[in-house]
Amino acid sequence: MSSQSTAQAAGSKWTDKAVYAAGAVVWRLIDGKLRILLIHRTKYRDITLPKGKVDPGEMLAETAVREVHEETGIRVSLGVPVGVSRYHLPSKKQKVVHYWAAEATAEAIRASTFVPNREIAALEWVSIKKARARLSYPVDLEILDFFANLVDDGVLRTFPVIALRHAKALSRSDWDGADAARPLTERGQHQASSIVGPLRAFGVRRIVTSDAVRCVQTVTPLAAALDRKKVKTEAISQDAWEEGRDDLRSVVGRRVRSGKPAVLCSHGPVLPGILTELALATGTIRGSYVSSAAALEPAAFSVVHLSATNPGSGIIAIETHIPKV
């Protein structure tokens, strides 16, 4: 596995002594040659990577996608995390910026509405070599170096399989019906809505969920936002897992072979098995990262990045996101 990242967005786990932001190394192929996007900022008269501060209620991934679009007019989906930069502002506060690789598709380029403005004077597509010469800040060069390593390793183009734990549900002691019928609490419903943006930031198109009500309700807002159907299956349910009737391997295998961004919504006890099957399906050596990525709070999710050209080459990166609600 090339890298592992934990991008936590729970307010309680952040410090008010820091300013949080997110951005991306946006890339595309022009005549078969890799080019990355630099922005020329008007106010600061510098050249940097697109990024911006987290808005209230946002998680880092949705900040990155929003800021790239606001600054460049390009809508992207996030790929592999490429590092975190830290530096001090004039106010003495530390600024912490999370970055991802993000491919700009031809369709996204055509749809861009960018025009020079008071914030961004110009956009420029350059080679990695030219970017190293033009970027204004050493912290940006560190991010670029991590990105360049992905290019050298041939694993830049990826797709995510996301393991999602259902949002907060009524406890068993407060529910008289079948366990599979337990619904979300009011907080759980808010959590389900709050993770729509972050999940969309990774380009999710396929939604697979345990048939338990609490899992189905967790992905219902996402399905509505994407106008996509939920695929409900007992194969990743807790009831089937407890009775030895689960079929995690088949479900995970289909998602890996498809090469399409997908989310699998399941239960705390089942998630370690899902992560293990992802490791096995991609030829990845199992390690402590599997346990860490599977130990999720309600409505938290781990993004497993796989090579789009060779899924059997192993897990490229894992990152975990925790809701603020």
Image: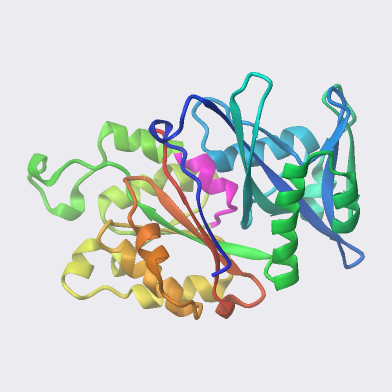
Residue beneath the point at 69% across and 48% down:
76
Numbered label tally: 0
Q: In this view, does 240 lie above or below 5?
A: below
Viewer-closest of 57 and 40: 40
Residue beneath the point at 64% across and 18% down:
91
Q: In which quarter of the image is the N terminus?
A: bottom right
Report the side of 268 relative to 193 (left or right): left
Q: Quadrant of the C terminus?
A: top left
Q: Toward which corner of the image does residue 184 lie, by quadrant? A: top left
Q: What stretch is highlighted in magenta?
A: 195-205
Residue beneath the point at 23% across and 62% down:
238
Q: Toward which corner of the image does residue 288 lie, by quadrant? A: bottom left
Q: Where is residue 211 in the image (x, y as percent from the top left)?
A: 29, 59
Report the side of 151 relative to 200 (left or right): right
Whether residue 209 can be seen here:
no
Residue beneath the point at 92% across and 65% down:
31
Report the side of 212 relative to 228 (left or right): left
Please say whether residue 199 is one of the residues in the magenta stretch. Answer: yes
Viewer-closest of 254 and 72: 72
Q: Is residue 134 above or below residue 113?
A: below
Whether residue 241 can be seen here:
yes
Q: Is residue 215 above or below residue 316?
A: above
- Residue sitting at the far top: 91
Please say whether residue 289 is one of the residues in the magenta stretch. Answer: no
Q: Position of residue 279 (x, y in %)?
A: 45, 74
Colour scheme:
rainbow
Q: Where is residue 246 in the image (x, y as percent from the top left)?
A: 27, 73
Q: Where is residue 294 in the image (x, y as percent from the top left)?
A: 35, 59
